[in-house]
Amino acid sequence: MSQPDVVDCLICQEHDGRVSIPGGHLIANDHVIAFHCPPMPQALEPYLGYLFVTSRRHVPSFAELDPDEAAAMGVAISKLSATLKAEGAEPVYLAGIGHAVPHLHVHLIPRWPETPTEISWINVDDWEGARRGNADAVGEWTFRLRNRLESLDQS
């Protein structure tokens, strides 16, 4: 990727603090940065529990990862999915689209028990009764998820 791509990349901005992430990063290591979906201007309040797992390095897809980066992405996705399930998600959906932002990011989308069965996986975060929260609520969720993640790491 060219330097201007990195400078303008929303995910790179979320990595380096130019875009505020309430509660901070859930995981930040040499290969992966994971965080809760932050509030964005002119958007609905974030769907609570909606996480992003991103490559630290600015690459557009899994195809460009080296084996260590790919393994770290898999471990992070597994741990965060388990964390969301421990919070009550039934199940956790994964999506890696990469159309709007060409920096590898996997969406972890929980389906909460109160979600009506007729709501498709792609709309769990859009329906009227979806769990939503402002920056403070996202920060609280991030704190709770980080604590649960740490307890899963210790078991």
Image (cartoon, helix red, strand yellow):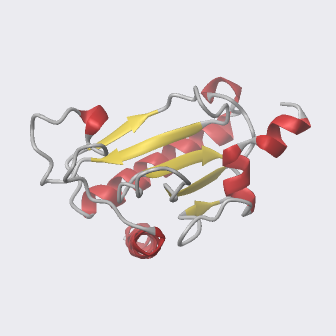
Residue 132 as seen in the image, left or right of residue 73: left
Q: Can you name the residue that lies furthest to the right here?
A: 3
On screen, 13 above or below 148? Answer: above
In percent of the image, x 68 and y 46: which residue is there?
10
Residue 36 as seen in the image, left or right of residue 104: left
On screen, 41 above or below 141? Answer: above
Name the spot of residue 17 as percent of width and height, x first: 72, 63
In percent of the image, x 41 and y 76: which residue is there?
140
In percent of the image, x 88 and y 32: which residue is there?
2
Q: Nearer the viewer, residue 97 or 76?
A: 97
Name the spot of residue 70 as percent of width and height, x first: 61, 37
Name the spot of residue 133 as percent of width and height, x first: 36, 65
Name the spot of residue 78 as percent of width and height, x first: 41, 48
Q: Can you name the residue that lies furthest to the front here?
A: 42
Q: Nearer the viewer, residue 121 or 33?
A: 121
On screen, 92 above or below 83? Answer: above
Q: Quadrant of the C terminus?
A: bottom left
| Quarter holding residue 16 | bottom right
* Number of disc labels: 0
| Quarter holding residue 79 | bottom left
